[in-house]
Amino acid sequence: MMKTVGRLFFVNPRGADTWCTATAVRSANRSVVMTAGHCVRRGASPANTNTTMVFVPGYDKGNRPYGVFAVRTALTPRGWAEEATDDVSALVVDADSKRRKLTDVVGGQVVAFGRPVGGKISAFGYPATRPQLGEQLLRCVGTAKKEGDVQSIPCDMTGGASGGPWLADFDEATGKGVLVSVNSQLDALESITKMYGPALGATAKTVYERAQRG
């Protein structure tokens, strides 16, 4: 069971209930969750912002073993709001109904900024594909490759997996690794289906730093 990864439920601008994937990470306020920018608002369209966001770590087939954490603040880079670049977001969640802070309950993944692209990556998500329909956490494993300003791994997880973590140095026994990206965009047109993720550099670090002060 991956305690730190969960489903991020929200209402989209059209009023529909939907979801992404998100991850509890280590932070000064013990309350930060990393996901994709497009899980918060549509790129280059700030008016199209999702609402009523709730993070459920360890979600599995309707079970909420570690409680529910309402999102208080959602931060995205200026580049995402204006130009649909830097598809990453840092969320700040409230304490749960028992007044417990998120990472006091589930722990948190370490986030690495400016780490060179490459090496074995485990990516996780709650894809909407059948038969899971977002009810189970799935995993892709592959070698990350740099492609322009982003990176890719072989992976065929579809919508719903967006925002899920890319973990380097993943230890199956502990469920811990180093978060180096998030699921951003799927390309199924090539012979090998690829998942793209942003490179977490200075821009992503700024958003994370703002969140951990929140």
Image (cartoon, rainbow, N blue to C red):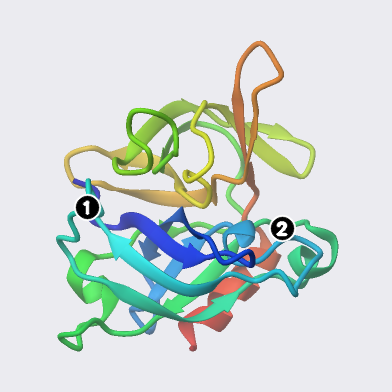
How many neighbours does mark 2 have within 10 angstroms: few (below 14), some (14-19), or many (20 or more)?
A: many
Hey, which quadrant is residue 107 in on the image? bottom left
Kindly indicate the quadrant of the structure image that contains residue 67.
bottom left
Inter-mark Cα distance, 2 to 1? 32 Å
Residue beneath disc 1 = 62
* Left or right of 102 in this view: 76: right
Foreground: 187 or 119? Answer: 187
> Considering the numbered disc 1 on the image, is that residue within a helix, a strand or a loop?
loop
Q: Residue at x 79, y 67 (%)?
A: 45
Looking at the picture, does residue 29 appear above or below residue 148? below
Numbered mark located on residue 86 in the image: 2
- Label 1 crowd (10 A; few <14 / some 14-19 / many >=20): few
Q: Residue type at mark 1: give it.
A: Gly
The x, y position of residue 140, in whole percent, is 42, 29
Amino acid type at image mark 2: Asp
Q: Residue at x 57, y 31 (%)?
A: 144
Residue 69 relative to residue 86: left or right: left
Name, please, the residue furthest toward the front.
15
- Mark 2 vs mark 1: give the one in front: 1
The reply to whether callout 2 and callout 1 are in contact (CB within 8 Å) is no
What residue is drawn where x is 61% and y is 39%? Answer: 117
Pick whichever, 160 or 82, lies toward us: 160
Left or right side of 122 for 84: right
In the image, residue 44 lies at what x, y percent?
Answer: 81, 64
Q: Residue 24's mark?
A: none
How many numbered tags mark residues here?
Answer: 2
Q: Is label 2 in a helix, a strand or a loop?
A: loop
**In the image, residue 108 lies at what x, y percent?**
31, 64
Q: Which residue occupies 66% across, 66% down? A: 41
Residue furthest right as drawn = 83
Residue 38's x, y, as percent? 64, 58
